[in-house]
């Protein structure tokens, strides 16, 4: 039987992949038997720069680990340094970080939905998703000064405050954005073509998802109720939070989780704005980090862990990041086994691969 | 077919994109556009050069020049926050595009003159 097997290379340059990852697909009669991944095309060595930049300046670099979840990376890094130095940041800074984090989750999910529609050749849906994303980016730019690299987190709080009048304006505009999202999500969840390409494709059983360490929408799409936001960091403890899950275990379930999370994020932003406390947005920081700390938070793609170790100088001695894409690659391999070759691009996209993030 | 309503709505809608550069790019008061330097206020303290995360700024104290490499600058606002003399600020417009050959590092000659100590002060010391 082995004589009929062929190896088809997929990537690193492929029309559906925004970033490079290589998969060797072992094919038997158009069916994938096995997929062998290889990574390392865009490794930048960002983590080793930690001994050449002061911890306060490294926030800018931590933010540039990923171009989409940049805000979560900077807030996770700051959270880590604050944990090392036992700094209590003001409540308002906590709430603002939560708000921006949720805005960036909406923009990341809209970006993914757009790219996914594009991979199916559904161009008008792709442009519609990105049109809505643009209004989210406008809000981010108006409040932080940057569209995707916000540059607003710093050790000890945030660098910019938002006036309460502007916040209530954002709250109102969000209602309009929500109705646009509703219209778009209706297409994603009910359209015949999309269902045909998603339902029953890329099955990941809950046991496999758990054993292979899936995180984020991939785990939640397999029915696992796993979300770091339940561990009550930032302002989630005051807001109250329940993860979105779907039981389909297929590509459609993962798409459904992301669509529903858009509404959940909108809901969280409404609650955060309503409960926004007054006061300062930053505290002054003195001293240097000493000791080690694991900082966790929920990115749009799943759980991210930053490990930091300091020795009492202004340079950290070690910094490690475990990003959600790397954790989801074993699940992707499990999903690909047994699928048809034509479905591979869509299944690869359902884990929302962010290779720049994964390789740092 | 679910998409049809949205597509038809777009026919009656004006384009969502703008015709940049014929129309100026949209920006907000908070937008970090590009770094603007005021040579008359710089005291050559070099804090901006020391703390620039992308090492885009070079201050030469002997030649009295302040140089910024626009291609290295990440417009993070750190120099603006650190400058005590208000010599560096941020403009909301994005800087114009170009290749490194066309837009090499920009150098400004520092024109700051240290104000003379007021006479009364000097007399008091004596």
Image (tube, coloured by chain):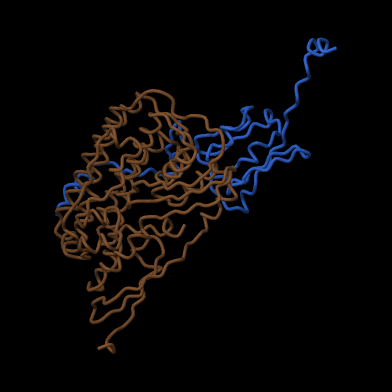
Chain colours: A brown, B blue
Q: Position of residue A71 (x, y in %)?
A: 41, 43
Query: A266 above or below A27?
Result: above
Residue that lies at the very extreme toward the front in this rendered image: A291
Residue B86 percent location from the top left of the image? 61, 28
Name the image quarter holding residue A335: bottom left
Q: Nearer the viewer, residue A93 or A233?
A: A233
- The answer to whether B54 appears left or right of B62 in the picture is left
Q: State which quarter of the image contains the N terminus of chain A.
A: bottom left
Image: B108 above or below A44: above
- Front residue of A45/B81: it is A45
Q: Position of residue B48 (x, y in %)?
A: 63, 37
- Asked if residue A335 lies left or right of residue A308, the reply is left
**Residue drawn where x is 38% and y is 38% of the image:** A140
Q: Is residue A70 above or below residue B35?
A: below
Question: Residue A24 at x, y = what percent?
Answer: 36, 75
Asked where in the image residue A274 lies, by quadrant, the reply is: top left
Relative placement, left or right, of B98 versus B10 is right
The residue drawn where x is 49% and y is 35% is: B92
How many numbered tags mark residues here?
0
């Amino acid at each position: 039987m082995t004589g009929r097997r062929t190896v088809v290379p997929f990537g690193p340059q492929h029309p559906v992949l925004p970033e490079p990852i290589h998969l060797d697909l072992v094919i038997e009669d158009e069916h994938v038997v096995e997929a062998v991944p290889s990574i390392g095309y865009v490794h930048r060595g960002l983590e080793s720069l930690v001994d050449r930049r002061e911890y306060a300046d490294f926030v800018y670099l931590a933010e540039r680990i990923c171009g989409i979840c940049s805000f979560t990376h900077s807030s996770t890094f700051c959270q880590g340094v604050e944990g090392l130095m036992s700094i209590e940041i003001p409540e308002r800074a906590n709430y603002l970080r939560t708000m921006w984090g949720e805005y960036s989750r909406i923009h990341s999910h809209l970006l993914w939905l757009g790219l996914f529609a594009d991979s199916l050749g559904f161009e008008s849906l792709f442009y519609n998703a990105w049109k809505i994303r643009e209004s989210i980016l406008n809000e981010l730019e108006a409040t932080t000064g940057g569209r995707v690299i916000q540059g607003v987190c710093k050790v000890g709080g945030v660098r910019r405050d938002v006036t309460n009048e502007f916040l209530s304006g954002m709250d109102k505009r969000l209602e309009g954005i929500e109705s646009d999202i509703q219209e778009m999500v209706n297409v994603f969840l009910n359209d015949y073509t999309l269902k045909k390409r998603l339902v029953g494709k890329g099955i990941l059983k809950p046991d496999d998802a758990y054993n292979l360490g899936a995180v984020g929408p991939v785990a939640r799409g397999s029915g696992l109720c796993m979300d770091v936001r339940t561990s009550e960091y930032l302002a989630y403890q005051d807001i109250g939070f329940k993860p979105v899950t779907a039981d389909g275990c297929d590509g459609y379930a993962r798409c459904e989780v992301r669509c529903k999370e858009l509404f959940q994020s909108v809901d969280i932003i409404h609650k955060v704005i309503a409960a926004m406390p007054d006061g300062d947005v930053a505290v002054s920081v003195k001293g240097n980090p000493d000791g080690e700390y694991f900082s966790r938070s929920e990115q749009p793609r799943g759980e991210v862990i930053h490990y930091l170790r300091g020795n009492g100088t202004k340079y950290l001695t070690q910094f490690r990041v475990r990003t959600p894409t790397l954790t989801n690659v074993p699940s992707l391999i499990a999903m690909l086994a047994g699928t048809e070759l034509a479905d591979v691009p869509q299944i690869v996209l359902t884990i929302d691969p962010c290779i720049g993030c994964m390789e740092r | 077919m679910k998409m049809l309503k949205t597509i038809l709505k777009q026919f009656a809608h004006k384009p969502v994109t703008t015709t940049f550069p014929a129309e100026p790019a949209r920006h907000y008061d908070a937008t970090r556009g590009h770094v603007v330097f005021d040579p008359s206020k710089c005291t050559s303290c070099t804090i901006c050069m020391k703390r620039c995360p992308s090492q885009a700024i070079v201050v030469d104290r002997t030649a009295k020049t302040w140089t910024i490499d626009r291609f290295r600058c990440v417009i993070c606002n750190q120099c603006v926050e650190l400058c005590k003399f208000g010599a560096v600020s941020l403009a909301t417009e994005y800087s114009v595009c170009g290749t490194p050959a066309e837009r090499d590092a920009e150098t400004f000659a520092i024109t700051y003159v240290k104000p003379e100590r007021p006479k009364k002060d000097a007399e008091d010391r004596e």
